C-alpha cells in the first residue's frame, strides 16, 4: 500500500469505510517510518471527515536502519520523552490533531510502569490521545501498567496458526477485565492460504472442508473461529484488497457449531483436547 498514490489509497480507505471498517491500525515504525505519512496524504485526499474514522498508532520500538541513524541496536523505549516524541511525529504524519488509541508496541523490560503511565495520562490530558493500551503484553505485564492507568486493549497475535493467547491467560484476562483484545495476523499473516508446514496444511484442509459445509470461504471460517471466542476479539485485517475485505465481513454473521470450533482447534493443536 505504501507504493499507492494518495488518490488510489484514498479509494481503499473510503471503500473500507463503506464496508463499516473504520478503524485503521498504524505504528510509528511501519513502512520504515513512512506508512503514516502515506496514509495521512490519502486521508487528506479522501472525502472522509476525521470523526468518521478511528486512528490507532503504536510507539516504543526503536529499529535499526537508515531512517534511524542513532540506533546501534534494535531496542524498546517506553520512556516519557520517547512516547511524547513518537506521538507528535505520528500526529504530524497522519495530519491529525488526535489519535483515537495509542498502544505501547512491545513490552519493554526497562519500563518504569508508573512513569510511563503518567506520560500516557498527560498525552490524554493534552488531547493528543483519546485512549491508551498495549500490544504483545503478557497478562502480568498488562496488570503492572493497568495498576497506574486504565488500558483499553491488548493487541496480540492470535489465529489458528497461533494459539498461545488461548492457553497462557491472555484471553482470560481480557474477559476478566472486560476489554476486547485486538488481534493481529488473524489469518496467520497469509500462512493459511499457502501453508508451508504441517500445522498450516492440517488447518487449511479442515477450513476447506468446513467451507464446503457452511458454503463459505475458508478465510471467513477462520475469522468466524476467532470471533466465536467470548472475549469478543477484534481482528485487524491485513489485506489491502477490498474484494477480500468485503468477503471477510461475512464472518460476523457466521456462527460455527461448538464441535466445528473444536475440530479446527484440534487441527491447529495437532492432537485432541484431553
Ligand atoms: N502489534 C503488533 O505487534 C503487530 C504485528 C504485526 C501486525 N500488526 C497489525 O496487524 C495487521 C494485520 O496483520 P497481517 O497482515 O499479518 O494480517 P492477516 O490478515 O493475517 O494477513 C494478511 C495477509 O494475508 C494475505 N491474504 C489474505 N487473504 C488472502 C487470501 N484469501 N488468499 C491469499 N492471501 C490472502 C494478504 O494478502 P493481500 O494483501 O494480497 O490480500 C496479506 O498478505 C497489520 O497490518 C498490522 O496493522 C500488528
Image: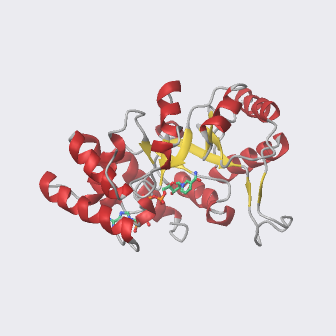
Which corner quadrant of the image does residue 202 belong to?
Answer: bottom left
Looking at the image, residue 146 sits to the left or right of residue 179; the answer is: right
User: How many labels were placed on the picture?
Assistant: 0
In-front residue for pair 75/59: 75
Which corner quadrant of the image does residue 238 belong to?
Answer: bottom left
Q: Residue at x 67, y 54 (%)?
A: 28
Q: Is residue 246 visible?
A: no
Looking at the image, residue 73 sits to the left or right of residue 33; the answer is: right
Residue extending farthest front: 274
Image location (x, y in percent) of residue 133 = 62, 37
Image location (x, y in percent) of residue 226 = 36, 45
Image location (x, y in percent) of residue 97 = 66, 39
In-front residue for pair 107/115: 107
Above or below, 212 against 115 in this view is: below
In-front residue for pair 114/20: 114
Image location (x, y in percent) of residue 98 = 64, 38
| Image quadrant where one finds the C terminus | top left
> In the rendered view, how is the structure colored?
secondary structure
Above or below, 131 against 83 in this view is: above
Looking at the image, residue 139 sits to the left or right of residue 272; the answer is: right
Q: On the rendering, which quadrant does ligand 1 occupy?
A: bottom left
Q: Is residue 273 visible?
A: yes
In-front residue for pair 269/110: 269
Looking at the image, residue 38 sits to the left or right of residue 126; the answer is: left
Amino acid at each position: 500500500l505504501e507504493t499507492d498514490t494518495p488518490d488510489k489509497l484514498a479509494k481503499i480507505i473510503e471503500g473500507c469505510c463503506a464496508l463499516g471498517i473504520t478503524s485503521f491500525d498504524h505504528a510509528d515504525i511501519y513502512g520504515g517510518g513512512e506508512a503514516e505519512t502515506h496514509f495521512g496524504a490519502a486521508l487528506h485526499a479522501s472525502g472522509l471527515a476525521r470523526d468518521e474514522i478511528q486512528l490507532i498508532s503504536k510507539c516504543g520500538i526503536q529499529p535499526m536502519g537508515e531512517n534511524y541513524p542513532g540506533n546501534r541496536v534494535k531496542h524498546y523505549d517506553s520512556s516519557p520523552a520517547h512516547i511524547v516524541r513518537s506521538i507528535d511525529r505520528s500526529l504530524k504524519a497522519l495530519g491529525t490533531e488526535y489519535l483515537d488509541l495509542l498502544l505501547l508496541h512491545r513490552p519493554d523490560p526497562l519500563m518504569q510502569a508508573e512513569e510511563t503511565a503518567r506520560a500516557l495520562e498527560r498525552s490524554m490530558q493534552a488531547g493528543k490521545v483519546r485512549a491508551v493500551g498495549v500490544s504483545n503484553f503478557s497478562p502480568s505485564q498488562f496488570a503492572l501498567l493497568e495498576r497506574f492507568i486504565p488500558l483499553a486493549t491488548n493487541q496480540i497475535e492470535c489465529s489458528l496458526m497461533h494459539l498461545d493467547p488461548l492457553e497462557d491467560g491472555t484471553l482470560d484476562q481480557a474477559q476478566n477485565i472486560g476489554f476486547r483484545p485486538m488481534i493481529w495476523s488473524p489469518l496467520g499473516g497469509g500462512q493459511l492460504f499457502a501453508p508451508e508446514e504441517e500445522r498450516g496444511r492440517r488447518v487449511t484442509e479442515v477450513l476447506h472442508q468446513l467451507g464446503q459445509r457452511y458454503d463459505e470461504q475458508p478465510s471467513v471460517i477462520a475469522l468466524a473461529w476467532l470471533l466465536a471466542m467470548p472475549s469478543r476479539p477484534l481482528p485487524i485485517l491485513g489485506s489491502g484488497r477490498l474484494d477480500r475485505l468485503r468477503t471477510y465481513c461475512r464472518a460476523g454473521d457466521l456462527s460455527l457449531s461448538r464441535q466445528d470450533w473444536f475440530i479446527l482447534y484440534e487441527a491447529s493443536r495437532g492432537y485432541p483436547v484431553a
